Image (cartoon, rainbow, N blue to C red):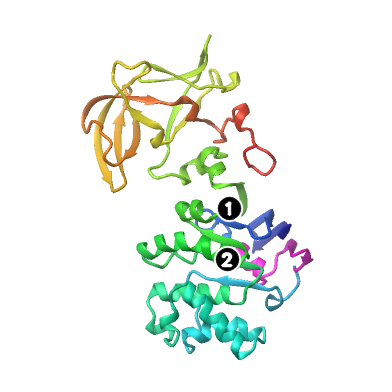
Amino acid sequence: MTTLQLQNITKRYKSQAVLDDLTLDVADGETLVLFGPSGAGKTVLLRLIAGVIEPDAGKIVIGGEDMTEVDAEHRGIGMAFQNFALFPHMNAFDNIASPLEANRSSAAGIREGVEKVAKLLKIDHVLSHRPKALSNGQKQRTALARALAGSPPVLLLDDPLRNVDAKLRFEMRLELPRLLAKQGATVIYVTQDYKEAMALGDRIAVMSQGRIRQIGTPEDIYNTPADIDIARLFGDPTINLLTVIPKKDASGVYVELSNVRVPLPSMPESVVGKECVLGLRPETIVFTEPSAQGAIPVTVEAETPLNEKTVTLLLTARGREILLSRPAGTPGPSSGPAAIAVNGAAAFLFDKESGARIATPATTTNRNGEAA
């Protein structure tokens, strides 16, 4: 069942369209992540759903009811902001209790609801503290607890982990899916952190300039990005992008790196002779023996250990840079001549002019931009 439907939503400020004819369906109990750069329209979209602002065109349907013109307090929505937005004159208990009080819950019900969610979020020991006495992490959890306390059918989370430290952010990425699953709410989660999007989302909607560029599971977005920009946004280190002109022989379509043939299985013949961009994820490239079949000669320029992985900067015979990523502790040359193997089946090919990914028959996309 679909809990939330956004139908042809448009929002303008003066002459600029912040959201442009946007349509989106979110299923009951689903966590959908809105991901994109600053200014993409993510927070504006949340505020429209919440009823804080009104669309210039389009319809907002929640639980099968048209809520486009319904006041915010009657939409049954919980929301947590990245800046916490706690009531400074109230302690943590009263902040969390505010939606329960608005629902006219009994005193016993309020206490039970507050203590339950506070215990889940590990802030039950600071319920008597006012916001100024709380750490950023405790403020964030208090704001999240307030959003959860009323058990709303729809929960809007506007980049709630942005202002907390790295350790807490990592912990909350692990805890939040469990908490949200227990809550059973339909969740719209905004973030600019691709790792957070991948960890938390059942699906990810990639936004840019007021439009949804692609929507799909985290695996869909990573493995079949719709275009170069989306491929760049997901992955650390970033994807390698090399301008190439595909060729064809009896074995099929291929490109050349350091004058070595790299087959591109199932790639359409229409790309032959056309200037394209080859996309190679750093983790799909591996060191190999120079004598191995298909080995590509390179020069190791630099190596950077990054805790769980090691990133190596390579130069091809033509002086083009390539990043290779391998698990920490995996052997590999740190300087000088070397050889790599490239899996052409894991490579992407993008149109040079439009930036769109050239899909193989196995990765064609449907109308929603999801991998078929």
At x 39%, y 65%, the residue is: 168
Q: Which residue is mark 2?
A: 182
Q: Which residue is mark 1?
A: 202
Q: Nearer the viewer, mark 1 or mark 2?
A: 2
Q: Element under label 2?
A: helix
Q: Nearer the viewer, residue 34 or 94?
A: 94
Magenta-colored stretch includes residue 60: yes
> Within 10 Å of the Cα at label 1, are there few (<14), some (14-19), or many (20+) other Cα atoms?
some
Could you tell me how many numbered marks the image carries? Answer: 2
Q: Element under label 1?
A: loop
Q: Amino acid at mark 2?
A: Lys
The residue segment tinted magenta is 44-67
Check the image and report above or below for 257 versus 88.
above
Q: Position of residue 132 (x, y in %)?
A: 40, 84
Q: Nearer the viewer, residue 228 or 254?
A: 254
Quarter of the picture holding the C terminus:
top right
At x 52%, y 75%, the residue is: 117
Quarter of the picture holding the N terminus:
bottom right
Left/right placement of residue 26 relative to residue 323 reads right
Distance CA(mark 1)–CA(mark 2): 15 Å
Q: Earlier in the sequence, mark 1 or mark 2?
A: 2
Q: Position of residue 163 (x, y in %)?
A: 41, 67
Q: Amino acid at mark 1?
A: Asp
Taking the image as drawn, is residue 17 in sight?
no
Q: Position of residue 77 (x, y in %)?
A: 65, 72
Q: Quadrant of residue 13?
A: bottom right
